[in-house]
Structure formats: structure tokens, C-alpha cells
Amino acid sequence: QKEVEQNSGPLSVPEGAIASLNCTYSDRGSQSFFWYRQYSGKSPELIMFIYSNGDKEDGRFTAQLNKASQYVSLLIRDSQPSDSATYLCAVNGPGGGGNKLTFGTGTQLKVEL
Amino acid sequence: EPEVTQTPSHQVTQMGQEVILRCVPISNHLYFYWYRQILGQKVEFLVSFYNNEISEKSEIFDDQFSVERPDGSNFTLKIRSTKLEDSAMYFCASSGSTYNSPLHFGNGTRLTVT
């Protein structure tokens, strides 16, 4: 069974700092990796996706993927109080049927003034 | 920006009753999904739908559940006889033309079974 592991936190960082969120996954066949942000009581909102080893940057966000270590991370630069949310790592494997995602439990991020 | 819309935002029903949750996926998307999140727990996959049929379903998606795309825009989840443990947030999602396209989620329907 596929597992996606995240530290539940909370991870507290001061405003303006870099927040580093980590995720490991068990299925070596996983091919697609996603980071979603979820505010309390709201739906997951897509932040980043990455398919290949290495780094992918989008504004203040950088996703990093290391398939050999089965590890994916999200860096948030210049953290803002509005970044305070739960960050969900989601992983998909090979095969058809669309993008069936396995989610982690999420890491709660708190950005403090 | 196009978005996935879900109705109703909150549904309260009595145990044993049937409920239908409705979704309008993003118009040019080809894959449709239902996920659920029990309060305080992970987001869990229920079912994926492509080309007018179920492409994959989880163990949760038993005979009490069904999905339908009754017309060109709506995508529905029916729970035939609700149980207390069906209480959760139900999220509809859609994705584009490739199997690994990112999912875009609707705002969810909070289902409360009493």
C-alpha cells in the first residue's frame, strides 16, 4: 500500500524566513508529486507539481524531488503570515485511471510576526 | 480562472437517507474525481471517472456509492443509504488531458449524517 509521510508539525517560522516542508513516499513507481495548501475548513489548493528529479521554482516556492531517496520537499521563501496553513504532499504512481493521489497527513505551518 | 464548483456547501441528512452531491468540473477537463476528508484526517481517494466510466475506485467506494455524469457539465456522487461514518468533507476534482495532470479541487460539500 502506498504511503506518504509528513511531519504533522506545527512548523513555526518567523516572517521573512524560509520554510522547509518535507515528504517521503513508499512507492518507488510514483511518478507525479504535488504540493497543496489547505486552510482550515477549506479545500486543497494546488501550489506546485514536479515530475522530474531536481528543483522547480515558481515565485517564492521551490519544489525539490529526489526519486532515489523517495523524498520531495517544498521551500517557501520570504514566508508571510498568509502562508500559515497545512501543506499536503500528494503522490501518484504509474498507470491509467487518471491522477489517483495518495495524500500525506499534512504539515501545519505557522508564520509568526 | 476556471474553477470546480460544488453544491451544496453543507448537507445534513439522517442515517439511511440517500444524498446526491453535485459538481461542475472545469469545462475542458477530461478526468473527474471524488475525494473525501474526515475531520482531522487525510484526504482520501474515492473514485476516478474518465470517458463516461469509472476508471478506478478505492475500497471505500462500495456498493452504497455511485457516480454519474448525467449531462455534459455535471458530475454527481450518490450515497444510497448514508451511515454516521459517511460524515466528512467531500471534494470533487478534475484534471486535464494527461493522466498525470494536476488535480483542481472544488470547495467541497460538508456532509453531516445524524
Image (tube, helix red, strand yellow):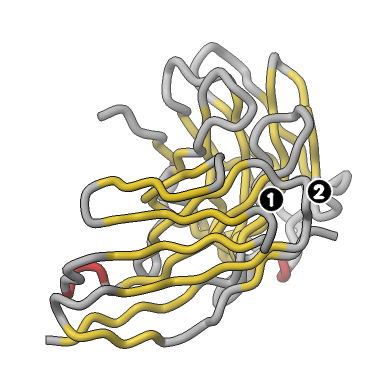
Q: Is residue B23 above or below residue A67?
A: above
SS for dot 1: strand
Quadrant of the rendered image containing residue B88? bottom right
* Pick the front one: B95 or A34: A34
Q: Are marks 2 and 1 in contact (CB under 8 Å)?
A: yes
Instruction: Point out the image quarter for the N terminus of chain A.
Output: bottom right
Asked if badges 2 and 1 are on one and the same chain, I answer yes
x 52%, y 29%: residue: B95
B43 or A111, which is in the foreground?
A111
Given the image, on which type of amino acid does mark 1 rest? Phe
Left or right relative to B56: residue B9: left
Answer with left or right where residue B61 lies relative to residue A59: right
- Tag on residue B45? 1
Splitting the image into 4 quarters, where does residue A36 fall?
bottom left
Ranked by sequence position, the earlier of labels 2 and 1 is 1
Report x, y in % for residue B60: 81, 55
Q: The disc labelled 2 sits on which kind of residue?
A: Ser
Q: Position of residue A82 (x, y in %)?
A: 19, 68
Which residue shows up at 71% across the image and 16% down it? Answer: B52
Location of mark 2 (residue): B58
